[in-house]
Amino acid sequence: MNRRTFLAGLASLTAARAAGAQPTRKLYRIGILGLTTTSILVGPEPRSPTTSALLRGMREQGYVYGEHFVTEPRGSDGKSERFSSLVAELVGLRVDVIVATGAAMPAVKQATSTIPVVMAAASDPVGSGYVQSLAHPGGNITGLSFADPELTGKRLELLKELVPGAAPVAVLWNRAARRSWQAAEATARERGWKLLSLEIEDAGEIERAFLAATAARAGGLLAAASGILFPRARQVAEVAAKSRLPVMYDLRPYVEAGGLMSYSANINDIWRRAAVFVDRILKGAKPADLPVEQPTKFELVINLKTAKALGITIAPQLLLRADEVIQ
């Protein structure tokens, strides 16, 4: 063997050993806790608009599904009591980070103090004890607030503008939305409006609640129980139509499903933005040091077709203020 051949062989052997010594790139696992069924949260092209928005955000951050990360989705099918077992599964899998809908946060807070958690639209993270403050979360949880209680008064005002008069406004809420109910009470007290409290605990009470609202001759209804209602947006819109009740919702998808009106931040934008937090955590940032973000843009969406079906004439000035009118 001549010297040149020997050196070439030695170089090849050294390169092969160096390549073999390189660490395998870690495949991150992102746990997802949603309100819908697990089946629509799965894979690189999920049917869930919010999960799809999260994955779009991950692509914008330079991540490729299957190459850099995979998801471990779990859906509660609108049953908040299921979140305890679902988050326990994710903790057992030792996922790298959990992205959780606001309704899942009580169970998440109780289940882990070590796995990083990104809130996607938690309605009251400080008041609920998920973080110490918005600027300094101080634990394993950060993410985005939905500012829901703060918007409840504005939603009530918009609903009363649509259906003025002395008739009471029914407020459909559940335990997780207590602060929203309290905010509605405060606004009504200040304006001298009458409210009808309709607290529900599960989806089986939805129709009964609407029947109670119509029996009390409510002029309209304010929906503030998305943890229960959101997975059944189309059903809720159909019950509202059958009840002939104008309803103000806290999320745009209700209106897209046939509901009358909503006023909120864009929930899909919030989930897309959650990817920025995931990226920073995967790169080594601690949730305790990442300030919680609050939405700065809110949209009024009106379904004109639903208004016509209900026999409601929407004032031109209200239509002009709408960010989108669905025909």
Image (cartoon, grey):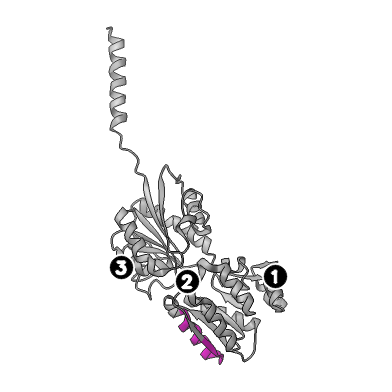
Identify which residue is drawn at 34% across, 55% down: 285
Report crowding for label 1: few under 14, some 14 to 19, many 20 or more residues within 10 A (C-alpha): some
SS of the residue under disc 1: helix
**Residue matched to label 1:** 305
Question: Which amino acid does the dot numbered 3 rest on?
Answer: Gln
Identify which residue is drawn at 38% across, 63% down: 142
Vertically, is 59 above or below 214? above
- Picture quadrant of residue 219: bottom right
Question: Which amino acid does the dot numbered 1 rest on?
Answer: Lys
Q: Whole-Å distance between the Cαs marked 1 and 3?
A: 44 Å
Question: Which amino acid does the dot numbered 2 rest on?
Answer: Ile
| In this picture, residue 303 sits left or right of residue 118 | right
Q: Is residue 133 visible?
A: yes
Report crowding for label 3: few under 14, some 14 to 19, many 20 or more residues within 10 A (C-alpha): few
**Residue matched to label 2:** 228
Residue ranking furthest to the top? 2
Secondary structure character of the magenta stretch overall: helix
Q: What span is colored magenta in the figure? A: 180-196
Report crowding for label 2: few under 14, some 14 to 19, many 20 or more residues within 10 A (C-alpha): many
Magenta stretch encompasses residue 192: yes
**Residue matched to label 3:** 110
Vertically, is 276 above or below 312? above
Magenta stretch encompasses residue 184: yes
Q: Position of residue 326 (x, y in %)?
A: 67, 66
- Picture quadrant of residue 157: bottom right
| Front residue of this view, candidates 18 and 168 | 168
Q: Whole-Å distance between the Cαs marked 2 and 1?
A: 25 Å
SS of the residue under disc 3: helix
Q: Nearer the viewer, mark 2 or mark 3?
A: 2
